[in-house]
Amino acid sequence: MTLTLSAVRWTPAVLADDLSKDVSVGTTKLAEFSSAEFKPNLLILNELKSTYNASIRLDITVGTFRFQTLTGTQKMLLRTDDFLSIKAVATATASLTASLQIILTPFSITDKLLMGKPLTEEEKKIAEKFDLEGEIQEGAFLTYEEIFSRIFKPIRIRSLHLESGTHSFTAFADRFPQLLGFEVPAGKTLKITADEQEVASITPVSDFSASVRISALRKLILECDDTFKATIADIKLTRYLRMLFGLMTKEEDEELWQRTKALV
């Protein structure tokens, strides 16, 4: 596994990785994350893609919930503050083509209500203030994609075809770079570093492309040993994001602080 969740400093974030490999008869681990790697965030399995192979089933464990599914592209929404495991269970030796997309997001009060987690007294007051339970009951709360499109305001977006080597994208006082997607050739390695932390080192078995959201408030560095493609956005560093990222305090704006805790 080539994702380092503990290196992701700024959330919400969306990450992706290639899980393709040759599997033997029996069980093969494809991906595994424990809460020690992503706390205090919430981890969401958002998508699991694979090419159909009748001899392979996917065994997925999310916290205490476990199930198996046939291979094939699966849209997911599986939240956990505990543990995620993905395994291949094969009845014959085979080549598995698969990838995942996961979301790391602050563990909001809305998420806690949806998951039946207990709230602190302060969180109960915030939930009541914004009528979060009512929003849930009426189906009015937003999807993660809708939330991210609201809070991340791009000043500009550019798609780049880059030469092999190292490419840096620097933040400014009012905006920061965010990686929105990439394409990397088969057998080549793409390293993604955000603010001196290596978030991912991806070496796909076949040509691989993915949609992501990886932010850097100082510098984003992409390094690849072949030509590759990347989509970069310059995101406005709003007061909401400053509070969400911990660059502002509750004392500076309690109303805004409450909104970020509810992710509304």
Image (cartoon, helix red, strand yellow):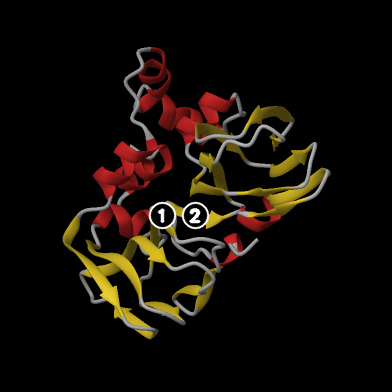
Q: Give the alpha-carbon distance from disc 1 to disc 2, as whole Å.
A: 6 Å
Q: Which mark is residue 210?
A: 1
Farthest residue to the bottom: give it. Answer: 165
Task: Name which residue type carries label 2.
Answer: Ala
Q: How many marks?
A: 2
Q: Is residue 32 above or below residue 156?
A: above
Q: Pick whichever of labels 1 and 2 is earlier in the sequence.
A: 2
> Mark 1 is on which residue type?
Ala
Q: Residue at x 41, y 19 (%)?
A: 136
In percent of width and height, residue 119 lies at 57, 31
Quarter placement of the N terminus:
bottom right
Viewer-proximal residue among 182 and 15: 182
Seen at 63% across and 37% down, the residue is: 53
- Residue ID at (49%, 80%): 196
Q: Answer yes or no: do the residues labelled 1 and 2 have beta carbons within 8 Å?
A: yes
Secondary structure of the residue carrying tag 1 is: strand
